[in-house]
Each structure stands twice: as C-alpha cells, then as structure tokens.
Amino acid sequence: MRSPQKLNKLWMLLVILFLSCSIEEEEVIVHQETTKPLIAKAGLKQIGTGVMMQAFYWDVPAGGTWWDTVKGKVQDWSNAGIDAIWLPPVSKAQNGPFSMGYDPFDYFDFGQYNQMGSTETRFGSLVELQGLITEAHTAQLSVIADIVINHNSGGASQANPYTGGSTWTDFQPMSGKFIRSYHDFHANGIHNNDSGAFGGYPDMCHHQTYVQNELWKNTESVAKYYKNVIGFDGWRFDYVKGFEPWVVKDWKNEVGGFAVGEYWDGNANTLDWWTSQAEVSAFDFACYYRMKDAFEGNNLNKLNDDMLWKHNASRAVTFVANHDTDEIFNGKMLAYAYILTHEGYPTMFYKDYEVWLDKNKLNNLIWIHNNLAGGTTTNLFTDTDEYIAKRNGYNNAGLVVYINNSNSWQERWVETNWANTLIKDYTGHSSWEPVTQSGKWVKIQVPPKSYSVWAPK
Ligand code: ZN
Ligand code: ZN
Ligand code: ZN
C-alpha cells in the first residue's frame, strides 16, 4: 500500500494540474458536446486504494457490444471496491471489427469512421465508448487507456529510401490525424532501430520530433485528446520492451495520470530498473511467475522469492491472469488471496471475476484488501504447502493470511501484532474465534486447498 499522506499530496497536485490544464485547454473542450467537465474527475476514488479491473479478455464477443456490456457492470464493480477499469485499445486497428486493438491504425477513430472493414470497432462506437466512460466516472471509477505505440499496422506500401525496398509505412487514416510515413518508423534518418520490434510490424520511432508531437506533446496529441476529450484518467502501456523508458516518462510528465507498463519479464530487478527509469508502475510479472511456480509447481516456498512489490510496492501492479497469459489453474483462488492480501496494486481479471471463479469469494477478498491489508509485510511461516504472512497495518489493524495448498486442514501457532484480542477469520472459512495471548501468539487454522484471513473481530 502507498502512504496515504503521500497520496493526499499527490492528489492535491493532480487537482491543481487539472484545474490549470482545464483553463489552457478550454477551447478543445468547448466544441466537444459529449465531454464532461474535467472538474468532475475530482470525485473519483484514489487509484491504488482499491483494486483495478481488467475489463476484457482475449476475444471478447465481437459485434460492437462490449462497451455496453462493461457499462452495465461498472456500478456493481465500484460497489465491490474496484477503483479503476482498464479498457482494451479503443481505436480502429488493421483487423477492424475483429481486432482486439493491438494492431493500431487510426488513433483517432473510436468507431466513427468507415475504414478497415467497419465503422464501429470490435467493442462499439465512439458514442458507446463515451457512454461507458461517463458511467464509470459516475461510479467514481478511473478509466485506464491501453496505449499501443511500439508498432503500427495497416499502412499502405511505399518505396522506402532507408531500407532500399518498400515498407508498409504509408498511413493515411480517415480521421486525418497523425498521418505517418517511413520517416516515422525504423529504420529512418535518425537510426536503424530502438530497443525492440513486435513481429514484423512497422516499429514506430519515438525519437522523431513529429511522432513525439503527435503522440503526447501537441494540444490535440493522442495523449491529450484521450485525456481531455475522450475522458481517460490513466494509461497502460503495451509492450514497453519495444522502446526506451523515457518515452513513457515523457508522456506521463506531459499529461499526468496513473500509468503502468507491460514490461513482460519475470526478473524483479529488471522490473525495478524499468519503473525507476520510466517513473511509473509496472505489472509484477515476477510475482506472477513466482505464483505460477508456487501453485502449479506445488511449492509455496517460491512465494518467498523475489518480486517487484518487494522492491517497490508503490510501483507494482499485481495480477493472477490477463488477456495474454493465464497459466495458474491449480489454486487460482489462493493466488488471488495472495495478491489481495499483499502489497502492490492488485488487478482483477474480468473472466475470473465474471465467469470462472466465485464472485462472492472475490468480493470478500477485495473487501479485505481495501479494509485490512495495510502496512508492511512479515512472513510468519512457509513450507511446500503452507504459507502464513502478516500485514502490519497502516491506519487499519492489518491481518494474518494463511494459505493452504495441501489436501487437509492445517493449524499453527503464529505471532500476531495484537495482545489479548479476540480475532476471527474474515473469509468465514474457519469458525474459530480465538483470543490472542498477552505475548500476541495465537493458534489459527485453514481448510484444505483454501485460505483464511485473521484480524480483530
Ligand atoms: Zn527511433
Ligand atoms: Zn500484450
Ligand atoms: Zn520498438
């Protein structure tokens, strides 16, 4: 968890930034009749105090209905303790009505131009997108945009003097905005490549001044348009291994908002390096792979290995599954019990929440996260099939979580932070209500293949 005091200061700063921005950019806003005043955003929950919902999975139903589907759920999610929703890339991509958005073509076609085989995107129209964002804001949720700027897709072929052949780098989107050519992709007059390319897609050059201006610097750049006109509050950067961290840092410094990068790497040191360079959060792939080892490999000792949140919890976004990778099947609820009781900003995967797992149990864990899971973490016991840790509390009591991957009930004496205190299991999995000793020790229990979470009653 972050320090609430720091968050308050940050929040104040953001409000001031918003106010100053809204004066500067009034002109942009006035002629957009569907745009809500920016000041309304001050009523949103503080990002990171609750849980983020990844509001899609790979191949959600096509046909332009997804924005409406999500719109129908945001109030319930907010009631359950969600504080932000992460949407898939919202603009028209090469595969038009079938695309999940990761093959971007026209950054300013939100389903209002007939190109790439359809007017609407796979998810819906511009009006439906704005309806969803308005509904989310009404429910006090921030909305996070998925930003794909490593590669582009769907350009026409053109002769390229830098490669000596022809490349698919001629982009003439119907929006008329951010027209691109071979100058804006590698190789070009600046250099041959950046830190990575995705498949064979044209790899955008962020060193190009025009690209910087169109992506985040100009008044109607992608970043400012998405924030000020469409209404996004934060950013999830796709495939950040494909370019240098300063790109994300510059974007964030220009428009603000919460930001998280998809640096797909299981090495906690590397993730920590990237977050300090980009000065934003990263998905905790180290935590993900250690949990996979722990639950799929039946060895909970792996939970004591290195993870990003152990380096810097304020920059770690933890997750059990996402649209790209979903490999923890054995003990998936136990993995959610882990991330929702530990440090970092946890993500809930739509399909787990709405389809595969027990929503009541997940809601219970979200409540525990938001109300009890404060402060630093102390490991109390670990072996191959049992794991016990305590959160030491920060403006709350803290908790003790007991995860059991064995096939039988387990019980253990543990040292809590509470003396002579009646405690209970907030998951309801155990009916014990023991009183801690004067020395703060107490015996707790947990059912087979399950978890319990203890705190003062
Ligand atoms: Zn470049
Ligand atoms: Zn991805
Ligand atoms: Zn790249």
Image: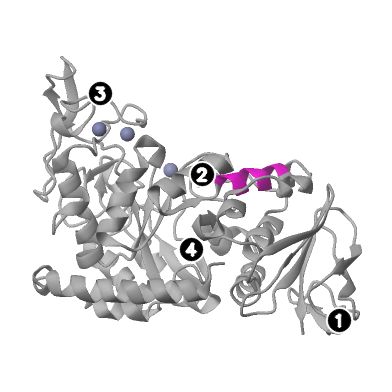
The residue at which mark 2 appears reads as 271
Residue 231 is situated, as x and y percent measured from the top left of the image, at: 26, 67
Mark 4 or mark 2, which is nearer to you?
Answer: 2
User: Mark 1 touching mark 4, by CB under 8 A?
Assistant: no
**In the shown orientation, is residue 273 left or right of residue 403?**
left
Q: CA distance from mark 4 to mark 2?
A: 22 Å
Mark 2 or mark 1, which is nearer to you?
Answer: 2
Q: Quadrant of ligand 1?
A: top left
The residue at which mark 4 appears reads as 53
Badge 3: residue crowd in 10 Å (few <14, some 14–19, many ≥20): few
Residue 112 is situated, as x and y percent measured from the top left of the image, at: 17, 57
Q: Which SS class for mark 3?
A: loop
Q: Residue at x 39, y 48 (%)?
A: 278
Which one is earlier in the sequence, the residue at label 2 or at label 1? 2
Asked whether mark 4 and ligand 2 are closer than 8 Å, the reply comes as no
The residue at which mark 1 appears reads as 433
Q: Which SS class for mark 1?
A: loop
Which one is earlier in the sequence, the residue at label 3 or at label 4? 4
Query: What's under tag 1, amino acid-wise?
Result: Glu
Badge 4: residue crowd in 10 Å (few <14, some 14–19, many ≥20): many
Which one is earlier in the sequence, the residue at label 4 or at label 2? 4
Magenta includes 292? yes
Residue 176 can be seen in this image: yes
Provide the residue span drawn in magenta. Answer: 285-293
Query: What's under tag 4, amino acid-wise?
Result: Met
Q: CA distance from mark 3 to mark 2?
A: 26 Å
Q: CA distance from mark 3 to mark 1?
A: 66 Å
